[in-house]
Image (cartoon, rainbow, N blue to C red):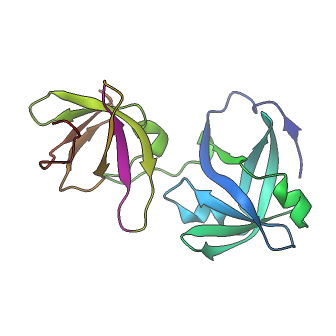
Amino acid sequence: MSGMGEKPGEDELLVVGMILRPHGVRGAVVVEAISDFPGRFLPGSRLLLETLATFRDVVVNSSSPHKGRLLVILEGVDDRDQAERLRGCHLWISARQVDTLGEGEYWIHELIGMNVLREDGSELGRVRDIALRDVQDILTVARPDGREFQVPFVGEFVRGVDTGNRTITVRLIEGMVPGD
């Protein structure tokens, strides 16, 4: 593992995963991927590990699917004690490492905070979170009154995403929005 220090250079960083817990006794960790590109965790991939607001380079030795998450072994993390110290840490990449997106694909960090509008233009709230699921991703939208609701991120409900104006237009069915 090479460099260690504050947030590296002027590069914008994008979070790609969070270490949930150790697994087994050989240093493996369970990772919640926060990236639509599983290739981020292929053997040999270089990531930045954030621990206590410092970053260090890490290399993925191996990864495999594990109960809807990933089981990852990082170079230099050789036992359960070392893995335990990484619990709750985030894994990042530099924005320079980002692949270009295809039509209809978005980065999670772009969607967080976007205004969610009905097709008539009335505001429903802001995207607070996104849950990545195998079948479909789910947007959590916070209403101005603090209540939240969820919208499956599929064409049936999400009618348009305008990254320039930071809006997502949705068509909802009765009962999706609390108090509506």
For residue 166, above or below residue 27: above
Q: Is residue 19 visible?
A: yes
Quadrant, the C terminus:
top left
Indicate whether 10 appears above or below 112.
above
Q: Position of residue 26 (x, y in %)?
A: 87, 73
Of 55 and 28, the residue lying toward us: 28
Left or right: 140 with respect to 69? left
Indicate whether residue 150 is drawn in magenta: no
Q: Nearer the viewer, residue 63 or 28?
A: 28
Q: Is residue 76 visible?
A: no
Q: Quadrant of residue 127?
A: top left
* Residue span colored magenta: 135-144
| Residue beneath the point at 29% across and 27% down | 165
Q: Position of residue 153 (x, y in %)?
A: 30, 53
The residue drawn where x is 69% and y is 46% is: 90
Horizontal and vertical percent for residue 61?
Answer: 78, 69
Q: Is residue 87 left or right of residue 158?
A: right
